[in-house]
Amino acid sequence: MERLLDKHWHHMQALDVAELLDVDPEMGLDRFETEKRLKEFGENVIATKRQKTALERFLLQFHQPLVYILIAAGVITTALGEWVDAGVILGVVLVNALVGYFQESKAVKALDSLAKSMSVHATALRCGTAVDLAASQLVPGDVVLLRSGDKVPADVRIFRTKELRIDESTLTGESVPVNKQASSVDKDSVLAERTCMAYAGTLVSYGQGRGIVTSTGQKTEIGRISGMIDDAQELDTPLTRKITRFSHVLLIAILVLAGVLMLLGLLRNEPFTDTFMAAVALAVGAIPEGLPAAVTIILALGVSRMAGRKAIVRKLPAVETLGGTTVICSDKTGTLTENQMTVQDIFAGFGRYDVSGTGYASSGSISPAGDAPHTTDNAALHECLRAGMLCNDAAIRNDGEQQIVLGDPTEAALLVSAEKHGLSRQDEQARFPRKDELAFESELQYMVTMHEKDGEALLLMKGSTERVLERCDTVLTAEGEMIPINPDEIIEHQHAMASKGLRVLALAKKRTTLSGELGHDAVASGMTLVGLQGMIDPPREEAKRAVATCQNAGIRVKMITGDHAITAQAIGLKLGLRGDSCNLGEDCPVLTGKEIGELTDEELIERVQGVPVFARVSPEQKLRLVMALQSLGEVCAMTGDGVNDAPALKQADIGIAMGISGTDAAKEAADMVLTDDNFATIEAAVEEGRGVFANLVKFIAWTLPTNAGEGLVILTAVLFGATLPILPVQILWINMTTAGCLGLMLAFEPMEPGIMKRPPRRPERPILDKVILWRIGLVSVLLLAAAFGLFKWELMNGATTEKARTMAVNAFVIIEAFYLFNSRSFRRSPFELGLGTNLWVVGGFGIMVILQILYTHAPFMNALFSSAAINLFDWFKIFLCGLIVFIIVEWDKKRTRTDI
C-alpha cells in the first residue's frame, strides 16, 4: 500500500479514494486492519532530529579562531609560569563562552514545535462507531469526523461537508478560511486551491465534514515541511563570516611576526629564553583579547535596545545581520496588512461609495465617490448595509481596545460597514427577527436568511456576484424603486472592484408570504439586487512608511504570500513596492507559484530581483526564492507566521517571526520575533542593527591600533636590540582595562543622523575599508613613536627601566583615551556630536585616568605589574602626546571621510 500514498488525492473522486485505500466510508476500518496499518506506516507523528546537548552547545562557543588564539596564549603563558597573564586570558575566554551559551540556550526547536502541533485528538469511525482517539493512532484509510474548532489531525480527502470552512493560513498564507467541498479539483491545483482536501495542523473554523485519511506523519504536508526545515542550511551571518575571516588573517599575521621575531633573535645569537619571551609578548600584544567579549556585549546591548522597540532577538549575531540586510521578504497578512477584513467600496443605487476606517472598530464613515449622489440618503445603500448585517452569523466582541471576531472575518467586515452607516444590529434584529436560514454551501456560493416583518417574510441573500445575479430579476435604485436588472452592467462594476484586489459580495432581498420551511426554491428567482460590497485586508499605514524608508535606504522589499495574485498586487501597489528598475503596476509583473514552478533555478535567479510581489507561493517555493536571492549575494531577511514559513525562516540570513499570530514552528525557526507583528518594527530593527554594526566597527577601529602599536613596539625593540619597553603582563593590563573602561563605551554611542539614508553594506565588503585601515595604521605608528620615544627618553635621562616602562604604558592608555573621542564618528568631530550625547565616553575617560594613577602610584600595583611612580611633569608629557594624536586624527578625519 505504500506506493498508493503518493497519489494526487485532490484529483481523484472520493469513491475512488475509498476504493484505493480499501475502506467503507460509512463504517471505517476495523481494529485488526488499523493495527496492521499502524505497524506498516508507523504513528501519525513527525520525526524529530537529534538536538545538540547543553554540553555540545557550550563547547561550540569556543569554536572561533580568535578564541583559539587566546587559548593558545593562555596555555603558553601558563607553561611559562605567568599565572596573572594566564588567568586574565582564560578568564576572558570563559566569560565570552558563558555569555554566548546563555544567549544560544533557546536554540532552534522547530521540529519539536511541529511535533507538538500534531499532538491532538481525533474522532474516527471504527467499525461504524465514532471513537475518540489520539491523532498519533490514525492510519491511512481512517474515516475522520471534522467539526468547528477541531485541528485537522492528518491529511484528509473530504467526501462530505456541511458548511465546512477551514483556516489554512498557517500552511498556505490564505487570509480567509477556505470553503471546502467534496468535488475533486484539477491535478495541477496549488495547495491553497485544493478545496476537497484538509491538511494536518489547520483549523476547522466553521461547519462539519467527513473525510478519509490519505497521509500521516512525515508523509503529510506539515511533515514534508518539517523535512524541509531539517534540510535547510543554517548559514553563518555576515558578521560571523567577517569576524572569522578577520580572525584568520590576524592569526596568520601574528604567527608570521612571532616567527620572524624568533628568527631574528636566533640569528643575532640572543638567548633563546629572551627571544621566546619577546615573541610571546608580541603575540599577546597583537591579540585583541577584549574583542570577542566586546562583540558579545555590543550585540547584547543591541538586543536590549531592540526589545524596547518590540523586536525580540533570539540569536546575538542577528542584531548585526539586520543592519546589513539588502532584501526583506515579507509575508502579507498581518505583517504588511492589518489582518482585519475591511469593507472599502460599496456599489448601491447605481452609485459608488468609499468606506473609511480600517479593521473591526466602527470608527469611520461612508461617503459618495465619483458620480454617486452626494448624499448617503440612498435607499439601496441602506438596504445593502442592512442585508449584510442581518444575513450574517459572525459576532465581534470587544476585549479592551482589541476587537475579537467570532466567526467568518468577511461577515465581521459587513457588520462594521453597517455600523459605520449608523445601523444597530440589536435594533435591526428586533425589527426583523430571524425565522429560518439556508446556510452557506460552497457548491451554491450563497447564504439566505428569512426574517419576519409585518406578517410577511423578508428574504435576504449574500454570496458571489454570479450566483446572486442568477436569481435576481430587478435591482433597487437610490430612490427605492425596483427596475429590471442588466446583469452585464453589474458584472462590470464587480470586475472594477475585483481589479483593485477587493473580495466582492453581492446582496439581494425579496418579500414574500410567511409560510412553511425555507427552501432553495424560494430564492431561485424574483430576488432584487440591493448592492455590492468590496472588502480587503488593508495595508497598515505605518507599513507603508516603513516600506518607503527601507526602499530609500537601498533595501529591496518583496512580498511573498499565499493569497491571490490580484489581491497581492493591489496591496503591493498601495504599499508602493517596486522592483529593481520599475514600479509595481507598470512593467513589474506579479509572479505566481505556478509560474515559479515552471522556472528552472537559473531562470528564477534571473527574474527574482526584478519582481516585487510573489503570490500563491508554496513552502518549497518560498525556500527557493530565499536561496535564489542568497545565490546573488543578497543578505536576506524573511518574515512569516505560519508553519509554511518555517523552512524559509530557517534558511534566510535572518528569520523574523510574528509574536502575536505566529505559530510555535515559525517562532522557533526564526532569529527574531516581533511582539507587535508589524513591518514597521522590522524597519526600526534594521535601523538599530545598522547602529550596532557602526558601533562595532568603531570599537574595532579603536582597539586595533593598541594591538598593532604594541606589536610594533616589541618588534622595534628586538630589531634594535633594545630592552622591551612593555612586558607581557603590562600589555594585558593595557588591553583589558582599556577595552572595558574605554572601548565598550562606544556601545552606547547613539545612531548618527541619516543612517537609514545610506545604502546597505554589501556582504562582500570587509569590516574595515581602506580609510579605516589607514586610520588604524596612522594611530599605530603614533603610538609607537610616543611610547618608544618616551621610553628611550627616560632611559637616556637616567630613569629606571620600571619608570621608563610606566611612561610607555601610560602613553598607550592616555593616547587610546583621547583617540576614543576621535572614534565616536568617522565623519564628524566630537565637538559636533557634543560630549553630552554619550556621557559614557566621558565617564570611561575619567575611570581610566583614575586606574592609571593607581597603576602608577599604588605600591601593590607597582609590585604586581613592575610599574613605578612618576612626577607631575611626566604626566604633562603623557597628556600632551594624547592631545597631539587627537589633533592629528581630527585633521585626518576631515581629509578622508567615510561611512560605515
Image (tube, rainbow, N blue to C red):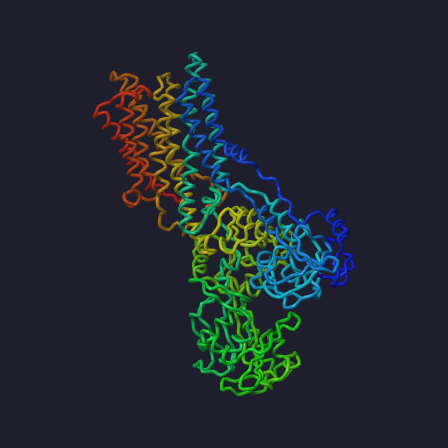
Pinpoint residue 559: horizontal percent, then vertical percent: 53, 57
Which quadrant of the figure contains the C terminus?
top left
Which of the two residues, 864 or 430, is positioned nearer the viewer here?
A: 430
Q: Residue sitting at 78 percent across and 57 percent down?
A: 22
Residue 834 is left or right of residue 735, and the answer is: left
Which of the two residues, 686 or 401, is positioned nearer the viewer here?
A: 401
**Up/down of 794 relative to 739, above or below:** above
Answer with the quarter of the image where residue 47 lies: top right
Pinpoint residue 399: horizontal percent, then vertical percent: 45, 62
**Up/down of 81 relative to 509, above or below:** above
Number of numbered discs overlaid on the protein picture? 0
> Looking at this rendering, what residue extends furthest in the left direction?
872
**Up/down of 323 relative to 153, above or below:** above
Task: Please say whether residue 564 is visible from this viewpoint.
Answer: no
Task: Please say whether residue 118 is visible from this viewpoint.
Answer: yes
**Up/down of 379 relative to 335, above or below:** below
Which of the two residues, 557 or 472, is positioned nearer the viewer here?
A: 472
Pinpoint residue 777: horizontal percent, then vertical percent: 38, 32
Pinpoint residue 474: horizontal percent, then vertical percent: 58, 85
